[in-house]
Image (cartoon, rainbow, N blue to C red):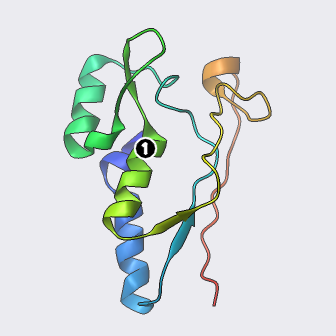
Amino acid sequence: GRPGVAADVVGATVDRIREHDAGPLQAFLGPAVCGRCYEVPADMRAEVSALEPAAHSATWTGTPALDLPAAVRAQLQRRDITIVGPDAPCTFEDERFFSHRREGLTGRFAAVAMLVE
């Protein structure tokens, strides 16, 4: 999420993995809200974008937004991580996925990280 992107949690995780394994790494990006749909206050966009420029975005209507998938992609690419699979669907646009922004309800997602030898 936004705090993790701002803190470069992905980068820190990759760095930690590389302390134990120097082999090639790949990443698959799962569904997430896209930069056209994740509207935020202008000051929040400025704060996160100062830390990760790839996060800077605007919504369909031109209001300030954050593109977290683009930010994570940039953080991975800076560490020479191969991103596999198709672009993940937007959780706001694709009704197959839960979206608090679309539904106003609480739900949960899970993340999986694993080393495959």
Residue 60: percent from left, percent from top = 48, 14
Q: Identify the residue position indicated by label 1 in the image.
A: 70
Point out the image quarter for the C terminus.
bottom right
Residue 44: percent from left, percent from top = 29, 27
Asked if residue 33 can be seen in this view, the reply is yes
* Side (left or right) of 38 relative to 106: left
x 19%, y 39%: residue: 50
* Side (left or right) of 57 relative to 114: left
Quadrant housing residue 17: bottom left
The one nearer the camera, 32 or 103, is: 32
x 23%, y 28%: residue: 46
Residue lying at the far right of the rendered structure: 96
Q: Is residue 5 above or below residue 38?
A: below
Asked if residue 4 can be seen in this view, the reply is no
x 38%, y 44%: residue: 3
Circle 1: residue type = Ala
Residue 19: percent from left, percent from top = 36, 87
Quadrant housing residue 22: bottom left
Residue 29: percent from left, percent from top = 58, 54
The one nearer the camera, 84 or 96, is: 84
**For the residue carrying disc 1, how many other residues have a C-alpha within 10 Å: few (<14), some (14-19), or many (20+)?**
some
x 77%, y 27%: residue: 95
Quadrant housing residue 70: top left
Secondary structure type for disc 1: helix
